[in-house]
Image (tube, coloured by chain):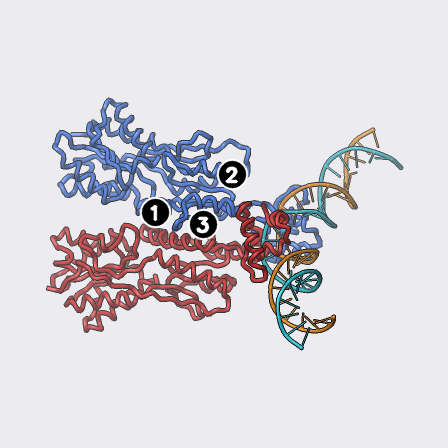
Chain colours: A blue, B red, C orange, D cyan
Amino acid sequence: MNLRELSAQLGLSQTTVSRALNGFPEVSEETRARVRAAAELHGYRPSAAARRLATGQSGTLGLVFPGERNMLGDLLFTEFLRGCVEKASELSYDITLAMAHGSQSEEAVYRRAVRNARVDAMILSSPLSEDPRPALLRQLGMPFIVHGRTSGVEPIGFLDIDNEGAFFSAAKLMADLGHRRVALLNGERHLNFAADRERGFRQGLSSRGVKAADDLFVVGPMVEQEGLRAASGLLDLPPAQRPTGFVCSSIGLALGVKRACSKRGLVIGRDVALIAHDDRLHDMGAENFDPPLTATQSSIGEAGRRVVELCIGMLRAPGDPMPAEIWPVDLVVRSSTMPAL
Amino acid sequence: MNLRELSAQLGLSQTTVSRALNGFPEVSEETRARVRAAAELHGYRPSAAARRLATGQSGTLGLVFPGERNMLGDLLFTEFLRGCVEKASELSYDITLAMAHGSQSEEAVYRRAVRNARVDAMILSSPLSEDPRPALLRQLGMPFIVHGRTSGVEPIGFLDIDNEGAFFSAAKLMADLGHRRVALLNGERHLNFAADRERGFRQGLSSRGVKAADDLFVVGPMVEQEGLRAASGLLDLPPAQRPTGFVCSSIGLALGVKRACSKRGLVIGRDVALIAHDDRLHDMGAENFDPPLTATQSSIGEAGRRVVELCIGMLRAPGDPMPAEIWPVDLVVRSSTMPAL
DNA sequence: TTGTTTTTCCAAAGCGCTTTGAATAACATT
DNA sequence: AATGTTATTCAAAGCGCTTTGGAAAAACAA
């Protein structure tokens, strides 16, 4: 059943039926009700393709698969994606995925997506500190929202968590508990969030007069394996240089730290203090850690949901200033932290 | 630049230009070349929306987020999805995702996708043994391909790996090596692949005259945690009942088994034999295990790529019989298996 | 030369919706 | 009664592509 048939059934014009269904004001409530009932009765659904053609809007948001593949990255992306899809579905939008393949550069992927006009806007995830994509999309005239932040002169719509503030708090807590040698296990520095976290961490320590030792900063893949490796190295330092506290950029890293401690007969929350950032991944919650983990936490799935809202909001009100949301991050104190000594 | 403008430029009709670009035979190679050059020059890209409306095809494949969320499931899904997106992109198709949300049942999701005619076909992943979705999609007239198998009377297009054969081989190898008590750590039985694997495993043992002991079958989430738990229980059995070999449905489970062994001073490949199924997830390869793991292996990403091919093939040749592919699974022997005693 | 087939191209009719510009009906104001 | 307002409804023009049914031109055969 299409619009023409439905209007014929009702003895109304397509215009009126279309307007009735789309909530325009210039149609009487009586006819609107009649139209709605008939549409419901006949199971009428407007054709997405026709609407697209008529409006120029596709009702679709695009997302690009991150180039680097690793376990944590995939997990984070999936959770973020899940949030996006969930919210998009609520708002009757579709999410389509793209990815660079073979010889095709990532740039080509964006170009293709834009040219074919298959999406109304794009969502950029896990941006680098110096990310070329925003400039490219801007130039191509494709609206977008960034999840995370990146350096760019122009106003860019984004949603990010307060990574700097979170790690400031974590470092400060460590310092307040008397820890003087605190290690930071973090992601690679070219990832913008990792840089933010390091900055916050350093400031958190120095705000309490503790100075950060360069050998206590380790960057790498944010997985258990790496946490184990890094922590093992640090715990084998001579006592005077050995850290008494660890701050980790992921629960995975924290797991590694715990194993390194276990091997040496050290107990988290008694001999070693531990704080990790918790992205609220399913079945990797800080509260299920043993012992329950003091953590900075922020749901990446929730962020996905919100990014979609921002994206659609931007499309509906093109004139509005770009959204720029920075979510505060809770520091939840559990049993993995204790005073030094 | 749209078709009308382009044809005007060329002094040709829209018909001819359209046909030239889409490779129809009734246009001379000379004009075709001329048209192609002009299209290239002006950066002409046909509007996806218009084509959709005209052809009734959306150039889009749908995929539904699995309902259950767990780490391994997400990892597998992501890798599968990556394969799908990659191949779809090569073939100029889009992948859009849907998911059940809030009060909306999964059924409603499919109904919505179908009614809105936003996708040409759907891909079903991780089917249950008794899965209602194929019947639903069939009834709604939506073409689909299943990744995995499910019981259904009608012919259903699917791609699956030979789970039964793989675990048959694994069990047989164990038996041939002299193991008489071999445990199977598997996924929940309502998952079709888990049932297939159990069947193959049992037959593999009995083909060598070894009879399976019920207490050596453990089902649950296929993650490290669970592997550790299950293996710990089994290794603490009295010597006569204790398994000397383990077959695991995932590398994650194998990791857990290894940790359970380590705690008891047992060494994989010396005291305990271990075989696992390897889905070729990025950075979870059996060859990187310590020790390198004897494994049945099959790339789930590759399966994603192939499923998309099958799907599109089905759309292009609607009359053809449904594809039904079962991939053989390699059993690669490495150092985690040794003769019993 | 004429008839027939093949090749090459085109005009026009959709696909199903939104939206513009007007027409009509109903009501209120002088 | 004439005029202005407001509330409803409609006819028709796209949106940019594919595809049908010819027609013109070219190639071939009789």
Q: Which residue is mark 3?
A: B101
Residue type of the residue flagged with mark 2:
Gly
First in sequence: mark 1 or mark 2? 1
Q: Measured from the top left, where is residue B137 in percent x and y?
A: 48, 62
- Which mark is in front, 2 or 3? 2
**Could you say which is closer to the camera, residue A190 or residue B294?**
A190
Quadrant of the rendered image containing residue A39: bottom right
Q: Measured from the top left, where is residue B279 in percent x and y?
A: 30, 57
Q: Residue at x 48, y 59 (%)?
A: B121
Measure the C-alpha gap from mark 1 to mark 2.
Answer: 29 Å
**Could you say which is closer to the camera, residue A187 or residue B41?**
B41
* Residue B331 appears in view: yes
- Which mark is in front, 1 or 2? 2
Co-location on one chain, circles 2 and 3? no
Q: Label 1: chain? A: A
- Which mark is in front, 3 or 1? 1
For this view, does B232 lie left or right of residue B320?
left
Q: Label 3: chain? A: B
Q: Measured from the top left, where is residue A68 in percent x and y?
A: 34, 45
Residue type of the residue flagged with mark 3:
His
- Badge number at residue A141: 2
Q: Measured from the top left, where is residue C24 in percent x and y?
A: 79, 46
Quadrant of the rendered image containing residue D8: top right
Q: Which residue is mark 1?
A: A74
Secondary structure of the residue carrying tag 1 is: helix
Q: Label 2: chain? A: A
